[in-house]
Image (tube, rainbow, N blue to C red):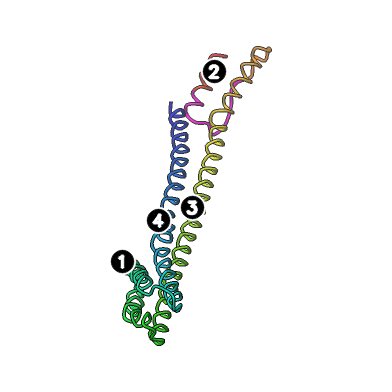
Amino acid sequence: MRLAQTVRLGAWILIGLNLLMAFGSIWVFTRMAPAIEVIIEQNERSLQACETMLASLAVADNHEADITRLKASFAAALENAQNNITEKKEPAALDAIDQDYAGAFKGDYGAKIRTVDAILLLGEINREAMVRADQKARQLGNAGAWGVVFMASAVFLTGMLFISALKKNLVMPLEEIDAVLTAHQSGDTMRRCSGTRLPKDIRRIFNNVNAFLD
């Protein structure tokens, strides 16, 4: 029967929309994860290097400090930052640090000022990158949330249309047949199945029921 095919098709459409919504939600979360990973693994690593370099310079002012050890710590942090370049403006700041930090540890005040300014610039570049990555993750999350809302609305509307069509083309005709047969059993032998704009399958069933009662 064509009606049965229509019911099966409607059910599969609902199942498909629900699966689409589920996979869409998974896709949104899997796309958000890399953006958060960038913040944690890349920019945080550069900021940690900046903190280590500033700390080494700050402690170097103490006359009792081990300058050799502090300079080695500074150089290691600088190397970590150089191996973690993720932004276009980072190389210039790193070059400035590399050129002046040796003089800064020797007590050159001008070199220390330039080194500190370059480190602060490097940190600012990475903080700005983190803000952009956070905004990107937020935008993706908002877009995904609205996408899920849209798909859920589509599932709801499709379900309502499916239920309405099922009620009109199946439930109500079955109720009509039940009412006619019940009336016939109660002695009302003149009542027959009737309806307008019926599917061909239901109209044929009505005609068969009416012919049987006739």
According to the image, label 4 marks what residue?
A: 34
* Numbered badge on residue 83: 1
Using residue 163 as the reference point, say whether residue 10 is left or right of it: left
Residue interval drawn in magenta: 192-204
Q: Nearer the viewer, residue 134 or 146?
A: 134
Q: CA distance from mark 2 to mark 1?
A: 83 Å
Q: CA distance from mark 2 to mark 4?
A: 64 Å
Circle 2 — which element? helix
* Numbered badge on residue 147: 3
Instruction: State yes or no: residue 199 in magenta.
Output: yes
Kindly identify the residue that appears in the image at 54 percent across and 43 percent down. Answer: 156
Q: Earlier in the sequence, mark 3 or mark 4?
A: 4
Number of residues whose C-alpha sits closer than 10 Å to that of mark 1, classed few (under 14), some (14–19) or many (20 or more): few
- Marks 1,3: beta carbons within 8 A: no
Q: Quadrant of residue 184?
A: top right
Q: Earlier in the sequence, mark 4 or mark 1?
A: 4
Classified by dominant secondary structure, the portion drawn in magenta counts as loop
Image quarter in which the N terminus is found = top left
Indicate which label's residue lies in the foreground, 1 or 3: 1
Circle 4 — which element? helix
Using residue 201 as the reference point, say whether residue 67 is left or right of it: left
Number of residues whose C-alpha sits closer than 10 Å to that of mark 3, classed few (under 14), some (14–19) or many (20 or more): some
Using residue 213 as the reference point, say whether residue 14 is left or right of it: left
Residue kind at label 1, given as amino acid type: Asn
- Relative image position of residue 37 (x, y in whole percent): 41, 57
In the rendered view, would you say 206 is above or below 26?
Answer: above
Indicate which label's residue lies in the foreground, 4 or 1: 1
Q: Earlier in the sequence, mark 2 or mark 1?
A: 1
Image quarter in which the C terminus is found = top right
Q: Quadrant of residue 54?
A: bottom left
Indicate which label's residue lies in the foreground, 2 or 1: 1
